[in-house]
Image: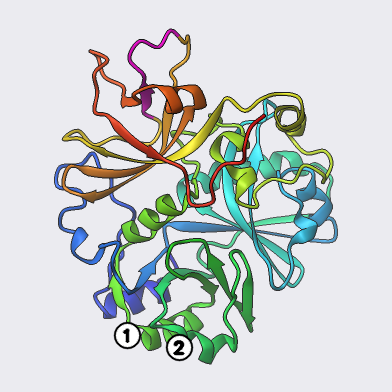
Amino acid sequence: MNQNWRAFLASRSADLSEPSDPTQSGAGSARFANNSLDLDCALVDLSYLGLIAIGGPEAEDFLQAQVSNDIRELSETHSQLNSHCSAKGRMIANFRMLRIEQTMFLLLPRTQLEPLFKRLQMFRLRADVTIDNASDALVCFGILGTCADAALTEVFGSLPAADNDMSRAGEAVLIRVPGNIPRYLFIGPPEQASHLWQSAAAEAVEANVDLWELHDIRAGIPTVLPETSDAFVPQMANMHLIDGVSFTKGCYTGQEVVARMQYLGKLKRRMYVAEVNTDSAPRPGDLLSVPGSKSEQAPGRIVNVRQIESGRYALLVVVEIRSAEGGEVRLASADGDGPLLSLQEPPYGFPVQT
């Protein structure tokens, strides 16, 4: 975390914690007071996210051969979701990408940053490209709701209206993030961040990061974590439904597998929003079960988890479509009778499969 930003937040007694581990005793209970999904407006420090900055004369060509989306669509007013896959077409990491002048930034959890950084360095070879860790140079925080619109407009002039769109003010950017209430992602220098946070805090609650992640789950936006790295082809996690995959951009690592699934195969697994009541907290990467299933593979796996209240959790889960539509999907347990999940489509829905 940028030390100036840390000092600023500490001076306001703001929450500096990372996302809570739901399996720890009491996790979420003390943090939940400011995490209600009914909050009208909130500020959330997102310093658990890191930034990889990629520049140089050949940066665009280099990245175009490494990521699942078409980076030619990045602009001063548009960001995108994206991923880097293994040769087998499974996501090593996913991230938000944006362009500021000639530099492209990849925003993702710091727990995933170092492995992705090393892979990009490995693929760089002789390309005229710079790859830097910019995590402590820029600040990232989130704004939920509309009560901070006046403070945001004062800095950025106009607010991005469509999901993934972006406004810019000097070295800072503001990105509209999907959700059932307006959400904005600020990325910029600590001085601008401090000024904007202080102005917005006149109306907004200063909440912790679990709130932001709860809204990501509700919006059906997956985050690949160390526990799920190399587990999902992008379409399994709905990346093609949220501006995260291009099927016309040309070759990239894993592209053949991703394209084959799109054009020659039939998607057998996809991601659902879920809730579960359980006394034993689930974790990303945990397997799911369907009683009576004869499949050699587990019918599903947890992508992301956040606690809603004591004993109740919101999840994103990748599940076999036939199991989701015809069976009781449960948390895996030794006796095969784990807690039952309540599944629903993400807000953006599913296309009709033929």
At which x and y percent is residue 81? Answer: 62, 53
Q: Amino acid at mark 2?
A: Ala
Tell me: residue 269, above or below residue 223: above
Task: Tell me the number on the disc at residue 116.
Answer: none
Q: Provide the secondary structure element on which disc 2 rests.
A: helix
For this orientation, the residue located farthest to the bottom is 154
At which x and y percent is residue 89? Answer: 67, 30
Q: Which residue is mark 2?
A: 151
Instruction: Give the distance between the C-alpha atoms of the residues marked 1 and 2, in whole angstroms.
Output: 10 Å
Tell me: residue 206, above or below residue 88: below
Rendering quarter of residue 336: top left
Query: What residue appears at the point 76 percent right and 55 percent down from the top-left corner?
Result: 71
At which x and y percent is residue 20? Answer: 28, 50
Q: Provide the secondary structure element on which disc 1 rests.
A: loop
Q: Which residue is mark 1?
A: 203
Q: Is the C-beta separation of discs 1 and 2 under 8 Å?
A: yes
**Where is the N terminus found, in terms of image quarters?**
bottom left
Sooner in the amino-acid sequence: mark 1 or mark 2: 2
Query: What residue appears at the point 45 percent right and 39 percent down from the top-left corner?
Result: 272
Which stretch is magenta? 286-294
Q: Is residue 55 visible?
A: yes
Q: Observer-nearest residue: 286 or 120? A: 286
Tell me: residue 235, above or below residue 287: below
153 in magenta: no
Tell me: residue 316, above or below residue 40: above
Crowd around label 2: few <14 · some 14–19 · many ≥20 (10 Å): some
